[in-house]
Amino acid sequence: QVQLVESGGGVVQAGGSLILSCAASGSIFSSNVMGWNRQAPGKQRELVATITRGGSTRYADSVKGRFTISRDNAKNTVYLQMNTLKPEDTAVYYCAAKYPSSSSWDYWGQGTQVTVSS
């Protein structure tokens, strides 16, 4: 059974940093795209960043230059380093995984809350 377990959320002041981790079990991690999405209250879930097994990354314009996604294939873990956090980054952050042939995410984590105070 595939599981994605996030950790690292919390409350931070504007301008601060947090790092989120997502540990993947099962076979989902080995050859797939991993990513982070977020959903703020009253808003739709949005893509934050993705990373392929080879390390190619993509970011939402709103986080470029502030967030960094990375993965440790030996540990089956993907990370999201978040710097210079803004109140508008407040959201539940979800780890996700998909097979190369999928057009949408196949698996989701349970989410972790990030709150940025002004």
Image (cartoon, grey):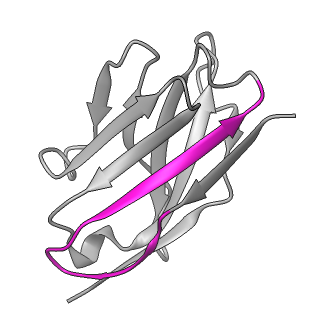
Task: Name, please, the residue furthest toward the bottom.
Answer: 118
The residue that appears at 36% across and 74% down in the rendered structure is 90
Q: Which segment did they paint magenta?
A: 8-26
> Measured from the top left, where is residue 116 in percent x and y?
30, 80
99 horizontally vs 92: left or right: right
Q: Position of residue 113 (x, y in %)?
A: 51, 72
Quarter of the image that includes the N terminus: top right
Is 30 placed left or right of 89 in the picture? right
In the rendered view, tell whether residue 72 sits above or below residue 43: above
12 drawn magenta: yes
Residue at 20% from the left image edge and 52% from the top image edge? 62
Task: Pick whichever, 33 or 46, lies toward us.
Answer: 33
Would you identify the image quadrant in which residue 85 lies? bottom left
* Magenta part, dominant SS: strand
Residue 56 placement, left or right of 106:
left
Q: Is residue 98 magenta?
A: no
**Looking at the rendering, in which quadrant would you find the C terminus?**
bottom left
Whether 116 is drawn above or below 97: the answer is below
Farthest residue to the front: give it. 74
State which quadrant residue 94 falls in.
bottom right
Q: Residue furthest right?
A: 1
**Total label count?**
0
* 28 over 11 or under it: above or below: above
